[in-house]
Amino acid sequence: MSKLFGFSIEDTEPLSPTAVSPIPPNDEDGNDHYMSSGFFGSYVDLEGVYRTEFELIKRYREMALHPEVDSAVEDIVNEAIVSDLNDSPVELDLDHLNASDGIKKKIRNEFKFIKDLLDFDKKSHEIYRNWYIDGRIYYHKIIDLKKPHEGLQELRYIDAMKMRYIRKEKKKDSDKYKAPVLRDTSNPMDYEFPELEEYFIYNAKSGVPTGNMNATGPSQGIKIAKDAITYCTSGLVDRNKGNTLSYLHKAIKSVNQLRMIEDSLVIYRLSRAPERRIFYIDVGNLPKMKAEQYLRDVMMRYRNKLVYDASTGEIRDDKKYMAMLEDFWLPRREGGRGTEISTLPGGQNLGEITDIEYFKKKLYRSLNVPPSRMDGEGGFNLGRSSEILRDELKFTKFVGRLRKRFSNMFNDMLKTQLLLKNVITPEDWEVMSEHIQYDFLYDNHFSELKESELLNERLNSVATAEPYIGRYFSQDYVRRKILRQTDEEILEQDKLIKKEIKDGTIPDPATIDPETGMPLDAVSASASSMDGGAPVMEPDLESETMKPVELPKGGEI
C-alpha cells in the first residue's frame, strides 16, 4: 500500500493557501470523507439489503439476468446507444467552442483516438450496459511513464467489484491521535484544516478488499493514483450510507415481489390443477396395525404411478414415492358406508393473472421504462405527436440525462489525452470543457414527430399573423415569440439568407410581387404579352386634331 502506481496531473495554479475549508469535497460519486481508522466500505445494514458495495453490485448483476429486467435494460441501452453501419454512436460537437480551427481539429483527432482505444464503435453497447447495471465504470489509463508526451497507450477496463475509490484524511505523525481543534475562535485561519488524499484501491480478487484501511499487505490491494483512473458513476447516491447506486436499485423490491408471486402461482397451479380421488377403504374391526397394513396393501395393489425419465427417455412404474398430487387413501371402520370413492375438484380461476400483470407493470415503472413497451403488442404509431404517450416523452428525457452522465467518461479521457500531448493547458481545459459537447446518434422517432409537429404549428401561426406584421407585430417579435428563434439562430439565418440571395439560390424578396408571389419582371412581362406586344396609346379626346364624326343619314320611312 505504500507504493502509488499510475500518474498524477498537477494543476499549475493551485488554490490560494487562504482559500481553505474544513468541509471535505464531495463530487457526488458516493464516496464520503473517510477517516484513517474507518473500515473499507463496510457497515452494519439493519434492513438486510446490503452491507458492502461488493454485495450491492452482485445483486444488480443478478437482477439483470431476470427476463423482464433484461428487456427493460435493453430498451434503455438501445435508445441511448444507436448502432449504425456508417455513423459512429457518438461524435464530438465543438460548434460552441471558441478556439481556432487547428485546435478543434486536434481535439477531434484525439477523441477519435480515444474511441479507437475503447473500440467504442463495436463495443459501445456492452460498455454502456455495464455502466448502467453496475452504476459505475472504471478504466485504467495506461501511459509510458518515460514518454508521457505520447499520450494514452491503452484504456483497460476494470471490474467494478475489484476497485474502490478512497478519500481519506492525511494524519501527521506528531498528532496521530489528535483531532483538529479550533484554538482561536477569533481567527478562523487558526483552524487546522485537514489535508485529504484521494486514490483507488485495486484487488484482483472480487470483493476481497475489506478491513482496516491502515492495514498493509497484498490482501489489502494496490493503491492507484486518482488521475490514472477514469471513474464514471450513475450520479445516484444513497445519502444515508454514502454508496453509489445503480438505476436498478429501486427495482430490487419489485423484482423480488414479481419472483415470489410467479413462484406462488406455479405452486398453486401444480397443487390445485389436477382432480384427485379419495378412497375410503372399509377395514372392519381390524386392529390399528393390521388396518394400516391392509390399507397399504390395497393402495399398492391399485396404485399405478408411471414416471418419465427425461435423461434416459424411459418410462417406468415408480410406486415407492408418494407425491402431493396423488390420490388420498383413508380407512373407514365397520358401521360406515363401506368402501367408497369420491373426487376432489381441481382449482378454479387458474387463468387469473391480474396480479402478475400488476407487478410486472410496477417493475417496468421502477425501471423508468414505459409500461406500453412491456409486451410489445402496441404497434408503433407514426401519426401526430398529440397521440404520443407522455411516458414516451419522459423516457426520452431520461435517456438524455443518462447520455449526459455517461459523457463524463469521455470528458475525463479526453482531458488526460490533451494535457499529456500539450494540446492545451489545465487552465484552458477549465474554460473549454464547458463548451465541448458529445453528440450521440439519435433514433427516437417520437422526438422527431414532436419536433415536426411543433414546427408545423409555429409555421401555421406565422401564416395567420402575416397580415398583422407591420401593424401590430414586428418581424423581430414574430421570429422570437412565435418561431422561438434565439439570437444566434436569427443572426445565422440572416447570414445564410443573404448568402443564398447573392448566389441566386433564392429570389430577392424585394423583387417579388406580394400579391402574386412572382418576380416583378415576370409580372410586367406577362402583362405585356397579354396586350399583344407594344402598348396601344389611347387618343386624347380633348385634342384639337380630333374631328367630330358625322353619322350617315338614313332613308325616311
Image: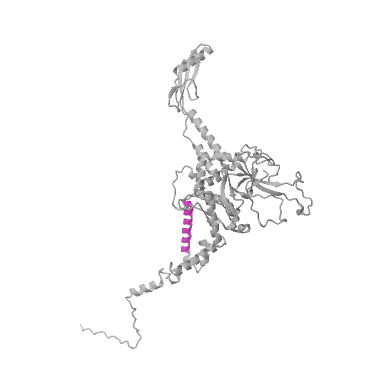
Pick the residue in front: 184 or 477. Answer: 184
In the image, is residue 160 above or below residue 90? Answer: above
In the image, is residue 288 above or below residue 237? Answer: above
In the image, is residue 474 above or below residue 171? Answer: below
Magenta highlight on residue 486: no
Residue visible at 48% across and 18% down in the picture: 280
Magenta range: 443-464
Could you say where residue 23 lies in the image, as x and y percent from the top left? Answer: 70, 50
Pick the residue in front: 458 or 298. Answer: 298
Residue visible at 51% across and 46% down in the picture: 125
* Residue furthest front as drawn: 146
Could you say where residue 46 lies in the image, as x and y percent from the top left? Answer: 65, 37
Total numbered labels: 0
Pick the residue in front: 358 or 441. Answer: 441
Task: Specify whether residue 343 is in view.
Answer: yes
Quadrant of the frame with the N terminus? top right
* Residue furthest bottom as drawn: 544
What secondary structure do most residues of the magenta stretch adopt?
Answer: helix
Here the colouring is one colour
Question: Which quarter of the picture shows residue 432?
Answer: bottom right
Could you say where residue 329 lies in the image, as x and y percent from the top left? Answer: 49, 19
Asked whether, in this view, residue 494 is left or right of residue 240, the answer is left
Magenta highlight on residue 458: yes
Could you say where residue 229 lies in the image, as x and y percent from the top left? Answer: 61, 48
Task: Specify whether residue 467 is in view.
Answer: no
Quadrant of the frame with the C terminus? bottom left
